[in-house]
Image: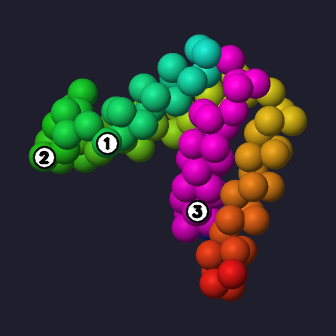
Amino acid sequence: MTSLKEKANQLKNETYALYLAFKDPRVPWYAKVLIAAIVSYTLSPIDLIPDFIPVIGYADDLILVPAGIYLVLKMIPEEVLEECRKKLAYLILKIDFGD
């Protein structure tokens, strides 16, 4: 059973892989639009439900963003996604070892 920290780390890595996929010409335009919408919503100071509302304030961030990432991962061709994940793994190793 994976821990919450591992799932959060995996979600972070998938987000970086989406960034790499966004730049790939083999990714359909509609997937790129959804990637841009997810990133814009995540970085936007405007929320559907303001964060200061107890409990449900963060619900939109905890539900919409992962759901959007999951949906867009299904839109990207698997071979492109695998290449992006491999590039990400290489970049992480390169950064960790200072090469």
Q: Say which residue appears at 66% left-offset and 37% top-offset.
A: 21
Q: Is residue 36 left or right of residue 50?
A: right
Q: Main secondary structure of the magenta part?
A: helix
Q: Earlier in the sequence, mark 3 or mark 1?
A: 3
When asked about the image quadrant of residue 64, the answer is: top left
Q: Earlier in the sequence, mark 2 or mark 3?
A: 3
Viewer-proximal residue, 68 or 2?
Answer: 68
- Residue 40 lies, in percent from the top left, at 36, 33
Residue beneath disc 2:
52
- Residue found at the far front of this picture: 99
Q: Secondary structure at mark 2?
A: loop
- Residue 10 lies, in percent from the top left, at 63, 57
Q: Say which residue appears at 68% left-offset and 65% top-offset.
A: 91
Q: Which mark is residue 70?
A: none
Residue beneath disc 1:
43
Q: Which quadrant holds the C terminus?
A: bottom right
Crowding at mark 1 (Cα within 10 Å: few <14, some 14-19, many 20+): few
Q: Say which residue appears at 51% left-offset and 20% top-offset.
A: 33
Task: Between label 1 and label 2, give the one nearer the viewer.
Answer: 1
Crowding at mark 3 (Cα within 10 Å: few <14, some 14-19, many 20+): few
Question: Marks 2 and 3, Cα distance to the nearest angstrom?
Answer: 25 Å
Question: Marks 1 and 2, Cα distance to the nearest angstrom?
Answer: 17 Å
Amino acid at circle 2: Phe
Task: Between label 2 and label 3, give the one nearer the viewer.
Answer: 3
Evaluate whether residue 76 shows in this view: yes
Q: Is residue 71 left or right of residue 55?
A: right
The region drawn magenta spans: 4-28
- Residue 77 lies, in percent from the top left, at 80, 27
Residue beneath disc 3:
9
Relative vertical location of residue 95 with respect to residue 67 in this rendering, above or below: below
